[in-house]
Amino acid sequence: MNVADSQRVGSSLEHLGYSLTNKPEEADVIVLNTCVVRQSAEDKAMGRVSSFKKLKMENPDLVINLMGCLVGVRGAEKLRAKLPYVDVFSPPSDPGPLISHLTQGEVQSIENSETTRRFLMMDEDLILPVAEQGKLVSAHVPIVYGCSHACTFCIIPSRRGGERSRPVGDIVAEVRSLARQGVKEVTLLGQIVDRYGKDIPDGPNLASLLRIVHDVEGIQRIRFLTSHPNYFTEELMDTIAALPKIMPHIEVPIQAGDDEVLLNMKRGYTQQEYRDLIAKIRERIPDCSIATDIIVGFPGETEEQFMETYRVISDLKLDVAHLARYSSREGTVATRRMDDNVPEEEKMRRLHMLDNLQEEIVADINKKYLGEVVDVLFEEKVKGRWRGRTPTNKLVFVESNEDLKGQLLPVTVTWTGPWSMQARLQTQPELISL
């Protein structure tokens, strides 16, 4: 989400006549876009913005903009007293305050102003900064901001506010703009992406939006993340199965495998309901890959409760498991009401257990690709090899002297490991300039 926000800010500034510099000491405007899901990230952000104070003293005309979750939807006033050298405080996903400051009030907050929405969409090449136009193969498109689910471990609702679905027209206009700029793949984003449209009476849902985006000319692949088990409908499954541009890769976190822990997390489903959902997805979308998120060491999690999570992962054999140790976060329900009583060394032990298990699972899954022909969308060259992804989001490396960037090509898999695969081209590619 922050990558997409930063791109929008960058292109908005270019629309006002600014150009990019990678050196803060050369800048007329510095934008620090922040993530504070973890306390360590917030501490890092505060340290980084503090480092700009010297530059401001040397150059009083320098405009410093602090943006994102550190500011949140209600945190600007508190930060102003602490950071008086910062000129502009912008909520997440909202370049409006900065643009307003630089245009002396002609453009206001994107949340409240149709003027800003028109400003941001008035140029077909506005979505990506100049440095990325024609060079970016895959791009992120936010479709729903904020979150109203309020899991007890999560700070996002208080920082990004309640969920707000973007209008279908704005989303499609952005996707068309990205396609004109050479983008081949878009990932639709939301904190809970399958709740898209639920804040709008009789509004669209994710399945209907996917059908509309599917018709955008030039876009070859569509992905979306992250889903919540409670809102992943059969209509959505059937839409993914029916439309060839929508990639068969699903991110649907379980977070924990024990029912009591899930209840304390306020997730809204049981272990068995999650198992049933995975079975239904696999039945309706054959050969799809599935990713999950897991938090170990949530307050009160016993060894037996952790082993429930271990057994779920062992049984379901999912393609990806994003693992994290629980960390207390000021402002969350879990921190206010629960004792963080699982020792750090125990959290780490549990994390390593799951990590080792998942490595074995993914290695076995990927072995099935050996010798198979799969389509890969190539993104960039890394250390002499072209990197791309399969429809199921498997990372593939190919050696070639040709320019493969942005091309969707069949390859034969020649080696597999748990985290990536190697392949050779099936045919010599036609050179296509982006």
Image (spheres, rainbow, N blue to C red):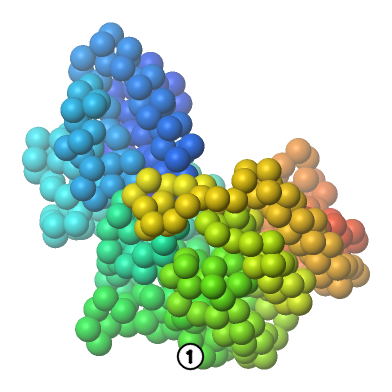
- Quarter of the image for residue 15 reads top left
Q: Which residue appears at 28% of the width and 9% of the height?
A: 58
Three-letter code for the amino acid on which mark 1 is drawn = Glu
Residue that protrudes farthest toward the left in the picture: 105
Q: Residue 145, position in %: x, y?
A: 33, 62
Q: Residue 238, position in %: x, y?
A: 54, 90
Q: Quadrant of the C terminus?
A: bottom right
Q: Which residue is mark 1?
A: 235
- Quarter of the image for residue 75 reads top left
Q: Which residue appears at 31% of the width and 17% of the height?
A: 53
Against 430, is 82 above or below?
A: above
Q: Residue 140, position in %: x, y?
A: 46, 58
Residue 65 shows up from this direction: yes
Against 163, is 62 above or below?
A: above
Q: Which residue appears at 17% of the width and 50% of the height?
A: 109
Q: Depth check: give the residue in front, 380 or 312.
A: 312
